Amino acid sequence: MHSFHYSNGSLHCEGVSIADLAEKHGTPLYVYSSETFRDRYTRLDDAFSAIDHEVAYAVKANSNLSVLRLLAGLGSGFDIVSGGELFRVLKAGGDPGKCTFAGVGKTREEIEYALREGIYSINVESEEEAAFISQVAGELNLVAPIAFRVNPNVDAKTHKYISTGKSENKFGIDFEFIADAYERASKLPNLNLKGLQMHIGSQLTSVSPFVEAVEKVAPLAADLKEKYGIEFFSIGGGIGIVYEEALASGSESWWINQPEETRPLTPEQYAAAIIPTLEPLGLKILLEPGRFIAGNAGILVSKCLYEKKGTTKTFKIVDSGMHQLIRPALYEGFHEIVPVTESAGAVESVDVVGPICESGDFFCQNRQVSSFMPGELIALMSAGAYGMVMASTYNSHPLPAEILVEGEQAKVVRKRQTLQDLVEAEEV
Ligand code: LLP
């Protein structure tokens, strides 16, 4: 469920009209719902209340400072992947003692920064990295808390670009080598073997790959606890969200009416399927959700500029594109497109495309959408995760503004870039 809905024929985020926001702040515009962020965090947290656990929100999904502040206020920890993300978490008032630092290519500067700030754990992706972290920690007279990321070689059955838990992926240490990696790391002077981590992929819509991975790795976690006294097991993120009927899925009745076999994965199902294997470990279980918390909490609002009818297609040309929401171009991602003013029901088959000089610059191709005309506003649903964070200024388009709604209030949490901002760091 989420907090985007039509009210009197006009799309709203909580109590705020999207058309009013577009009028006041212009388009393209990202709009987020505080209520949805809160609801998603709380539901997942509650689903695991039977065991010792912590939600470490994956900052990469949406790293706006106000979003991080909101989640920090709920007690969230953070899964970060760069010094930049750590900087954001600290700026937002997050606790570094609740942060895990992942990623295959951490630099010396980033490792020093994380250690100095007292990070909870660095999640290490190779033995070379472990040796380097021990050396850096030694130079700082510190002991580095680490976990290895294990690659369990489990098929997440998701798009190949967001599948991470197979041995052909660059992530983690192969299951076959992981016990030796711990053994060797236990002899390094400045490491504290604190946990074990895995993450098999993103946008998983069925629970079975999670179950397979947890069942495969749990005995290893138990073994590492006994040998080295590790205290946590992070099972990563990856819970999928609804993209296809995103707007309808905001209401409880939609969920109730979904046939059992097609019902999207819920946090309760996810928890029920894996807690029986996790509980006997007696370890703290870390969760690293990004998309599940942020995805349905945001939309991208865009204005239709032109309609172009070709011999085979109708193109709706809008003022946003792949530079501001790259998921359709990069992962064949589906984002539902709805008119901001509810239409009378006419639908047409169109390509919705942006202004960028690339044929990959589309939001949909040959899709039946509710009709909209030049001058009208549309919303791209489920754009709260991996939307603005992946935006670029390609073709020198300034970045859009971001709005965070709370009830009847709307706050600009990121100003729209200006043309001057685009060239600020450059010299002639
Ligand atoms: N933990 C680790 C180690 C990760 O690599 C990721 C995502 C997460 C947690 C969070 O995964 P989530 O819960 O959001 O699925 N840009 C792509 C998604 C890339 C995900 C990368 N890693 C997209 O738009 O689909």
Image (cartoon, helix red, strand yellow):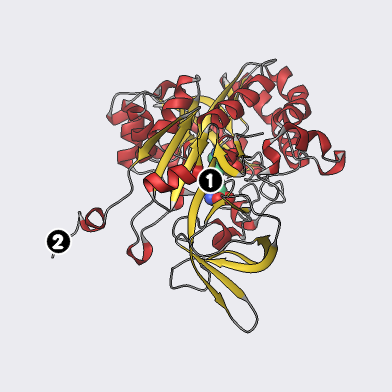
Residue drawn at x 31%, y 33% as measured from the top left = 112
Query: For mark 1, what is the residue?
Result: 299
SS state under label 1 = strand
**Which badge, 2 or 1, comes first in the chain's sequence?**
1
The disc placed on residue 427 is 2
Residue drawn at x 36%, y 53% as measured from the top left = 399
Ligand 1 within 8 Å of disc 1? The answer is no
Q: Position of residue 163 (x, y in %)?
A: 63, 51
How dense is the environment of label 2, judged by Cα within 10 Å: few (below 14), some, or many (20 and up)? few
> At label 1, which amino acid type do we have?
Ile
- Residue 97 in the image: above or below residue 82: above
**Residue 385, can we see it?**
no
Q: Position of residue 60 (x, y in %)?
A: 47, 42
**Residue 368, can we see it?**
yes
Residue 257 found in image quarter: top right
Relative placement, left or right, of 141 versus 76 is left
Ligand 1 placement by image quarter: top right
For marks 2 and 1, give the CA distance.
Answer: 35 Å
**Number of disc labels:** 2
- Tag nearer the camera, 2 or 1: 1
- Residue 46 in the image: above or below residue 212: above
